[in-house]
Amino acid sequence: MSMMKPEERLAVAIARLILDPKAPPARHVAVGAASPIPAAACFLVQKLGYPIRLSLLSRRTGNPFTEGTRELFDLTGQGRIDLFFLGGGQIDGQANLNLVGTGDWPGMGVRFPGSFGSAFMYMMVPRVILFREEHSPRVFVPKVDNISAPGVSPPGVFRRGHAQALVTGKCVFRFHPDRARFSLDSLHPGETVESIRAATGFDFDVEGNIPTTPDATEQELALLRGPVCDEMLETYPEFCARVFDRKAAA
């Protein structure tokens, strides 16, 4: 089996978070448009034999939503989506997300893609896995310039859940809503606690010896490069060509 690529490590790390026995069950998982690595993780979970229902919003065929995202919001409001993935142009140590832009409101410094439904999904889905490949002080800031979606809420504000974890190109953080802080969960190969601190603008907790993010098993790699890639070719052709060296049939 050839060397594991960083994207494969991240997909496996997310798959293991999805299957975390300490977390609420993930029966119906939705994946947004620009999320090939979380999508790969979800397909991997399915191919490993776990019966999750996966709604891939950007898929041209087999998308269950005939009216697009409106139906996703309806299902979420009814409590029928268990897990979603979110990222941000900026993410801070309280798991606040900024998808608007940098600088004072309305964030006209560096413009980000926009909040869309992130605030609603963050509040109404029991589990959210945050994901951002770039791990730098530019992204992980002490305090986001604008809060698109809040990581925690004041007492009396209804929300179904919080971030479960933050997966980055360098490590995995766990989020603790009771104290509104991240703790370091695992380090990708070559990283240290010191290298993570140097690349992270917010403070985080370190509890005991931090393990290395586990490698993919031979079975997981074979599934990613075979059946998972087959599922993803139509929706994420560039990703499959770059990571799996596979191209869709003409």
Image (cartoon, rainbow, N blue to C red):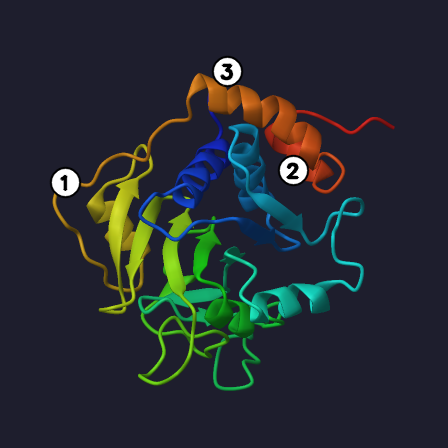
Residue 13, percent across and down? 41, 38
Q: Taking 126 as reference, is 61 above or below it? A: above
Please give the name of the residue rendered at 80% of the width and 44% of the height, measured from the top-left corner: 61
In the displayed structure image, the side of residue 226 where residue 67 appears, left or right? right
How many numbered marks does the figure carry?
A: 3
Q: Name the residue under label 1.
A: 209
Mark 2 or mark 1, which has the lower sequence index?
1
Q: Name the residue under label 3.
A: 2
User: For residue 234, which quarter of the picture?
Assistant: top right
Crowd band around label 3 with a 10 angstrom C-alpha radius: few (<14), some (14–19), many (20+)? few
Please give the name of the residue rendered at 69% of the width and 54% of the height, measured from the top-left corner: 57
Q: Nearer the viewer, residue 129 or 23?
A: 23
Residue 77, percent across and down? 57, 71
Q: Nearer the viewer, residue 248 or 55?
A: 55
Q: How far apart are marks 3 and 2 (CA)?
A: 18 Å
**Please, what secondary structure does the residue beneath circle 2 have?**
helix
Farthest residue to the left: give it: 208
In the displayed structure image, the side of residue 115 where residue 19 appears, left or right? left
**Amino acid type at image mark 2:** Phe
Q: Mark 2 points at which residue?
A: 239
